[in-house]
Structures are given as C-alpha cells and as structure tokens.
Amino acid sequence: MFPQGYTLGSCLTVNLTPKELDRLIALVTPLYLDFSPESTPEKIRGRLTRDPSTAIDLLYKGESLVCFGVYYARKVEEKKICFRDGIVLKEGERNQGFYKEFVQLGLDRYPSDLLMTRTREPRVYKTLRRFAESGGLYPREGSTPPLFVAEIAQLFCGAKEASDFDPVTLVVKNIHTDEKPFLKVDDPGIMEFFARYLGPRDAFMVVVPTR
Ligand SMILES: CC(C)(COP(=O)(O)OP(=O)(O)OC[C@H]1O[C@@H](n2cnc3c(N)ncnc32)[C@H](O)[C@@H]1OP(=O)(O)O)[C@@H](O)C(=O)NCCC(=O)NCCS
C-alpha cells in the first residue's frame, strides 16, 4: 500500500491514556502548525477527541512522521457516515497518491454510505470524487444536492450562523480565519469550480455517496 521505508500506525484516540494523548498531540503539532499556523494545542486536542469513534492514522518515513489523517464515524437517518476531519501530508511527500490511501483506510475501518469532509482544497475534492458511486459527489456543477445531502452537510458544517451555509452550493462562508491560495490540481474544471464559488475564507462541504 505504501512504498518500502514507510510504516503506518493507527489508533482510536478514545483508547489512549491522558499521557498518550498528550504525546500524540505533541507528535502531530509540527505538521498541524505547518498547515494551520494559527492553531493551538487545545484546538488540536479538540480535533483529536471530537467523537468517541475518532481515529488517527500516522505515516512514518523511517522515524519521521510525514502524514496524519483524522476521521470519525456517525450514523444519521440510517446513513453511515465517515467524516474526514483533517489530513496533513508533509511537503516533499505529496503527489504520490497517499491521500487516496488514507481515505481508503478510513473506509476499510468504517464501511460507509457517505464520505464527507469540509475543505477548500481542490486536491481533496479530486481524490474524494474517485470514491463516488455512479451518482457522483456533491457539490458539483449542474446538480442540486438532494434534500438529505443538504441536511446532513448542514449538520456537520460547523457554521456559526445558519445563513453562513448554502444548501445548494454547499458553501460554508467565513469558516477559516486565514486565507490560502488553492493547491493546484491537474483538472482545470475543478480549479474553476473552486475559484467561482469559494471566497478566501470559505469552504465546501463535500458529500460523497460511496455505495
Ligand atoms: C491535501 C493533501 C493531503 C493531498 O495530498 P497530496 O499528496 O498533495 O495529493 P495526492 O498525491 O494524494 O493527490 C490528490 C489529487 O491531487 C492531484 N495532484 C496532487 N499533486 C498535484 C500537483 N502537484 N499538480 C496537479 N495535481 C496534483 C492528483 O492528481 C490527485 O488526484 P487523483 O486522486 O484523482 O489522482 C496534501 O496536499 C496536504 O497535506 N495539503 C496541506 C494540508 C491540507 O490542505 N489538508 C486538507 C485539509 S481539508
């Protein structure tokens, strides 16, 4: 799955002792801050312990941590959901398809009807689209999300005000405190889609029916 020289570690954070959780937070913090410099230890702790099902996968190259991915499982109206709650891959280790492997790990652990995340990264969208069953993913050009998709997206979106979430475009307004340029993907349609709908602090709720 991962090339030689890489090793994977995984755990449910609920199973960690307080000391082990502190060590895990210290371990992921440098990568986390590379991606999100304004984050704090408390925010990181909150992300790692958001749900009793929260799991983390850690990828090492030799002794060095090069990626972590966090996700949790929920059931809403009989739909099993795997919510991807963050991934950071060290620069220099990107563009090798590792993101797809991480998403698959989560689905293997939590076989799900819906894969979800909140993102402003075209690369995330492009990879998640690979997991979409024939109907495709939401949001997408020319397709209004069904009501249940809009409702579930709203439940998970984290918007402060209901009016910050658009149930048609699945855009969450002003959810980020910083501004970042998009990482480029080799699909101009996706780049254009993101540029058209997302302001500098916005994100999409991405909902992927997987089966
Ligand atoms: C988002 C992230 C995990 C994706 O990992 P990655 O190694 O860059 O991406 P992958 O190699 O798995 O590729 C993802 C997609 O982007 C495309 N892509 C990756 N690098 C690319 C590049 N340099 N140019 C064009 N397209 C590229 C790939 O074609 C791939 O699409 P596919 O799955 O359909 O083949 C990584 O870029 C990262 O850690 N970014 C910073 C943190 C972040 O933004 N996290 C997401 C929070 S929601």
Image (cartoon, rainbow, N blue to C red):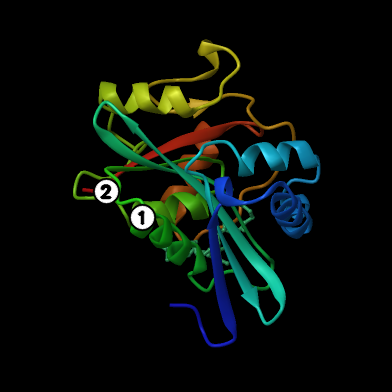
Q: Quick one: 190 or 105, which is closer to the camera? A: 105
Residue labelled with disc 2: 210
Residue labelled with disc 1: 107
Q: Is residue 37 visible?
A: yes
Q: Quick one: 201 or 84, which is closer to the camera? A: 84
Residue 24 occupies which quadrant of the picture?
bottom right
**Which residue is rendered at x = 56% and y = 21% of the image?**
159
Q: Are marks 2 and 1 in contact (CB under 8 Å)?
A: yes
Horizontally, is 4 left or right of 17 in the view?
Answer: left
Point out which mark residue 69 bears.
Answer: none
**Residue 11 at x, y = what percent?**
54, 58
Mark positioned earlier in the residue sequence (2 or 1): 1
Residue mark closest to the camera, 2 vs 1:
1
Q: Residue furthest bottom?
A: 4
Quadrant of the rendered image holding ligand 1: bottom right
Separation of residues labelled 2 and 1 (CA atoms): 9 Å
Q: Provide the secondary structure element on which disc 2 rests.
A: loop
Residue 166 occupies which quadrant of the picture?
top left
Q: Provide the secondary structure element on which disc 1 rests.
A: helix
**Which residue is rendered at x = 59% and y = 69% of the image?**
59
Amino acid type of the residue tagged 1 in the rendering: Leu
Horizontally, is 7 left or right of 65 in the view?
Answer: left
Amino acid type of the residue tagged 2 in the rendering: Thr
